[in-house]
Image (cartoon, rainbow, N blue to C red):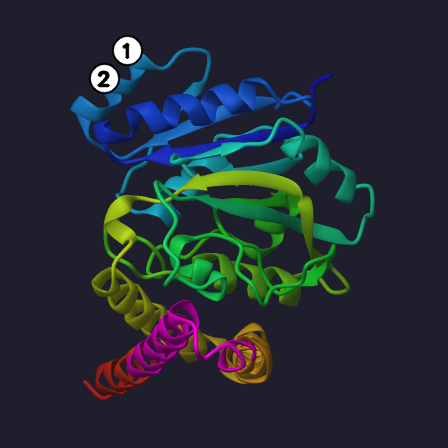
Amino acid sequence: MSSNISVVVSTYSKDRLEYLADCIASLKEQTLKPAEIILVLDPKPELVEFYKAKIADVRIAVSQEPGLSNARNVGVKNSRGEVVAFIDDDAFADKNWLGNLAKNYEEREIIGVGGQITPLWDKAHRWFPDELNWILGCTYKGLPEKRGSIRNPIGCNMSFRREAFEKAGYFRSDIGRFGKKLLSGEEMEFSLRVLEKIPNSKIMYDPSAIVYHRVDAKKANLRYLCKRSFYEGVSKSLITSVAGENTKTALSTENQYLKHLLKAAIPSRLKRIYKFQSISQIFVLTLSSLMVFSGFLAGKIMNHKERNI
């Protein structure tokens, strides 16, 4: 049975071929078949020719500008489905992914749905706490564990009704990932705009809609953790600068997450302080939080200077 869901995946590098092939294969094996699979490529002629020769049975679209937001927008504009779902090129979907996303749209007020993103490590890293899986673009400890309403989904596993784009516009290209630059937040800003433009709408998190996200071995180090955390703070400052009166709402998830760290994550590890894993994870959680805060302040300073030029 086919759905009325278009699936968009984008890539910017030939190096992603193996992962991308696995991703597309998982989409073709869904129990609820996608209406179409759209592969969006960066505007590089050699990249376009490469993937046209390597990937079959998908629609290929070419972005006019580089950047993840631009690619997703091109995917939406070239899609036909009533719902548009997004998955990353280095992820692959559980066979029931689309079916479990689709069930949520039986409720008319639901405008968007995100699901669980499970990290696949090359090898386990005991020093890395589950609370920081957001650094990897994955579901992190501190999010709701059951189906429920959320502020925004995570980009590797998200979907929206076409109505969301018709009424709220598209992803902002001046916010979010651009090649290997570690900014983020385009999903958050778009979701806030959707909820504002479409009164009484809801965005749901459904943990039964699962995708698996590969974790590059290069990300398993403190240098990447610090850099990604810093740019997360910068991204949050960019979003709050455009949120205006909605700043409190914009940071609601972050406030809940901080409470989880202070009331649950760190205290639970302090009870096992005699274990090296607990000590190392407390250190990493603290370091990441400090880098996020530093990035947030740096972003505020940059925004203030730009406004006064």
| Image quadrant containing the N terminus | top right
Residue under label 2, please give it. 49
In the rendered image, is residue 61 in sight?
no
> 128 above or below 207?
below
Element marked by disc 2: helix
- Range drawn in magenta: 268-294
Mark 2, Cα crowd under 10 Å, few <14 / some 14-19 / many 20+, is few
Q: Residue at x 22, y 86 (%)?
A: 305
User: What type is the residue that disc 1 sits on?
Assistant: Ala
In the rendered image, is residue 108 in sight?
yes
Q: Residue at x 22, y 27 (%)?
A: 14
User: What type is the residue that disc 2 sits on?
Assistant: Glu
Q: Marks 2 and 1, Cα distance to the nearest angstrom?
A: 6 Å
| Image quadrant containing the C terminus | bottom left
Q: Residue at x 45, y 60 (%)?
A: 134
In the image, is 50 to the left or to the right of 79?
Answer: left
Residue under label 1, please give it. 53
Element marked by disc 1: helix
Outermost front residue: 274
> 104 above or below 52?
below
- Coordinates of residue 79 in the picture (x, y in percent): 53, 30
- Coordinates of residue 182 in the picture (x, y in percent): 28, 59
* The stretch drawn in magenta includes residue 52: no
* The stretch drawn in magenta includes residue 292: yes
Is the residue under label 1 in contact with that under label 2 (CB below 8 Å)?
yes
Exactly how many numbered labels are in the figure? 2
